[in-house]
Amino acid sequence: MRENTVVLTLKQIADWQLSSRDKIAKGACWAEMPSFQRGLVWKPAQIEVLWDSLMRGIPIGALSLLPIEGNERFQKKKVDMNLSEAYWVVDGQQRSNAIALGFKPFPDKNESILWLDMLPDRSKRTRRKFFFYVTTPGRPWGYRVTSGNDERVVENVSTDEYRRILREELKWDKGMGSKPPTYMLWPVKAKLPVPFSKLREYFMPNGKLRESFAPNGFEDLFASIIAENAEWARHFQRCWSSYQ
């Protein structure tokens, strides 16, 4: 069996799930999840901690890929493709999925979202440096980061707290027993939450790092967020106004 090391960017790993194979650049490394892999089992806290590690430059381990050479199903799909080779992901499915979540555009449907708190509560005794939050269709209001040595532990948000958000901020009129889609809510325990995809759009337009930034810090970033016609952006504006 051929063994070698391939260095990939996070975007390349995310593209395995977010792009179609025929749109991958010529000569790029393509991998997909084999049918024998188990389903997605990571909890939101594990995704949050992985992104904290990525932002801090902490190694997250290598992914193990197995060449698909000779596989009949792949050979049929390979016709007219630019790919010279492709792989199965045999170890790293959960990490690949977590990385892809950080590259998803802000959704127009009910799906999980990765957020970053721009003003995290530093009084918490936690090893996290970057306070990421994941909201899911089941819990579109997210979780609470706890104090302690295990940063993978989170707690549920109280029912009264998120119901207050529904009534006062969302003006939710569909009953307290129903849940809004994730794109309407935000992690309620974050002080100043922003979808991570919006931050990438600001810092890396067209996939490349911006060459210059506003002289007044993040004012143009915050202005662009406030201009968004979305419930989370209006919440951001209310929170930001209270800190000014």
Image: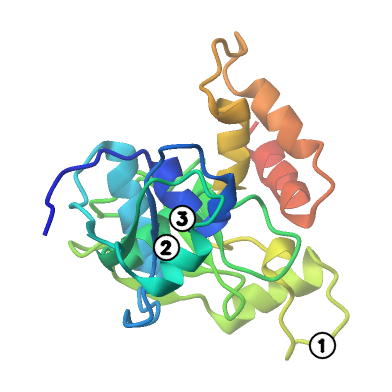
Q: Secondary structure at mark 3?
A: helix
Instruction: Give the image quarter of residue 90.
Output: bottom left
Disc 1 residue type (three-letter): Gly
Q: Secondary structure at mark 1?
A: loop
Report which residue position mark 3 lands on. Answer: 16
Picture layout, residue 198 above or below residue 98: above
Q: Residues within 10 Å of mark 3 (few under 14, many from 20)?
A: some
Instruction: Give the image quarter of residue 94.
Output: bottom left
Q: Is residue 197 left or right of residue 170?
A: left
Q: Residues within 10 Å of mark 1 (few under 14, many from 20)?
A: few
Picture layout, residue 29 above or below residue 45: above
Q: CA distance from mark 1 to mark 3?
A: 39 Å
- Mark sitting earlier along the chain (1/3): 3
Quadrant holding the C terminus: top right
Q: Mark 3 or mark 2: which is in front?
A: 3
Q: Mark 2 or mark 1: which is in front?
A: 2
Q: Mark 1 or mark 3: which is in front?
A: 3
Report which residue position mark 1 lands on. Answer: 175
Q: CA distance from mark 3 to mark 2?
A: 9 Å
Q: Which one is in front, 94 or 156?
A: 94
Q: CA distance from mark 2 to mark 1?
A: 33 Å
Disc 2 residue type (three-letter): Asn
Give how far across and how far down residue 227 sits, in percent.
82, 36
Mark 2 and 1 residues: CB-CB less than 8 Å, in contact?
no
Give the residue at the far bottom of this rendering. Answer: 177
Give how far across and how far down residue 203 sits, in percent.
55, 27
**Residue located 82% across and 88% down the image:** 175
**Residue located 62% across and 71% down the image:** 140
Report which residue position mark 2 lands on. Answer: 97
Picture layout, residue 226 above or below residue 219: below
Colour logic: rainbow
